[in-house]
Image: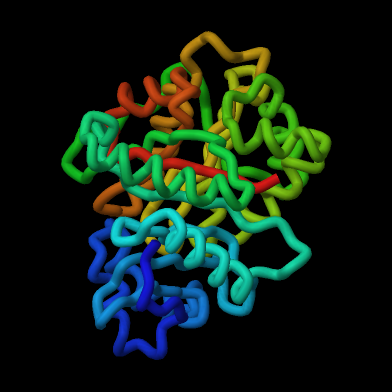
Amino acid sequence: MQSDFSIRPLNGREELDLFCSIPYAINHEIHSDLDCGRRRLEWLWVAVQDGRLLGRIGWWTRSAGEPPAVLDIFDISGLDDHAGDALVATAMRAVLPRDGTPPQYLRWLLAPDWREEPAEVREAERRGAALGRFGARPLAERLRFQWDVGAPVPPASTRLTFRPIANREELVDLMTEVVSGTLDAHTIRELTAMTPAEQAASQYENELARYTSSHAWWRIAELPDGRPVGFVIPARNAYHPIIAYIGVLPEFRGHGYVDDILAEGTRVLAGAAVSRIRGATDVGNAPMARAFLRAGYRVLARQLDMVWE
């Protein structure tokens, strides 16, 4: 059992170098996240011994003034299990509401081949086990894709036409339809607690409507006779241009239309002169993963998601 270490939040921005002394792909974003209110110093906790960082935990939110939305920083490589549990318990008790469900845990940007690295596997298992002792369970492993400027821009569809989305109601109605048969683990989980219409409305209000990039980028895909086949939501979040959502209506699946629709979303963003486009899907959603690869995206990283019930 470790002793003689302290668990506390950061005392000020002058300690950010200490906090970032454990390498992680999103360390460089923490300064600007604090500036924008997506993070707060009292949400960034450390376990320190003799000025050396042994472990850390930190939360993120979408907009200033909102409660923590994601636990996305968690490292305990310098702590034994007892000390790691003490870090989690102390920080969660101070940061999170006592009567609420903790926000999901995301481990960003693991290497595509991280499971071939014993040290990476060992640390991922320790982090998962530590959070599991506080009630978290694994939900999904996700593939994160990136299209880079200079890669071929997919050609325009010869089978479908595209138009802007008319209004919120049109998009939410289509979102309600596409959740039937979904392979997305987060959506499947949400559908245990709400109807498809409720899930679609919630995702629209809490995610899509909050993108500050142009909603004129959003596209509905139609057959020549005007029947909608699906839609794509190109957007820009706080960090990257992204394919935020793509859907094919159940009756049109199996005909490769996802390629046409993803190509259109990529063309919209490429036309906005972006240098890269990010996208993601669950490892279990093999059709979507293959579509990203066919569209010229590469696997950038993997991501692990855990949730509390």
Q: Is residue 14 visible?
A: yes
What sort of colour scheme is used for the picture? rainbow
Residue lying farthest to the top in this orientation? 254
Which of the 4 image quadrants contains residue 49? bottom left
Left or right placement of residue 246 versus residue 198 in this view: left
Residue 258 in the image, given as x and y percentages of width and height:
48, 22
Q: Quadrant of the N terminus?
A: bottom left
Which residue corresponds to the image point at 25% horizontal and 52% vertical from the top-left? 275
Please determine whether, in this image, residue 272 is positioned above or below residue 8. Answer: above
Please determine whether, in this image, residue 131 is positioned above or below residue 296. Answer: below
Which residue corresponds to the image point at 31% horizontal and 74% vertical from the top-left? 19
**Front one among 242 and 12:** 12
Q: Is residue 17 visible?
A: no
Residue 269 in the image, given as x and y percentages of width and height:
37, 47
Which of the 4 image quadrants contains residue 189? top right
Left or right placement of residue 6 versus residue 202 in this view: left
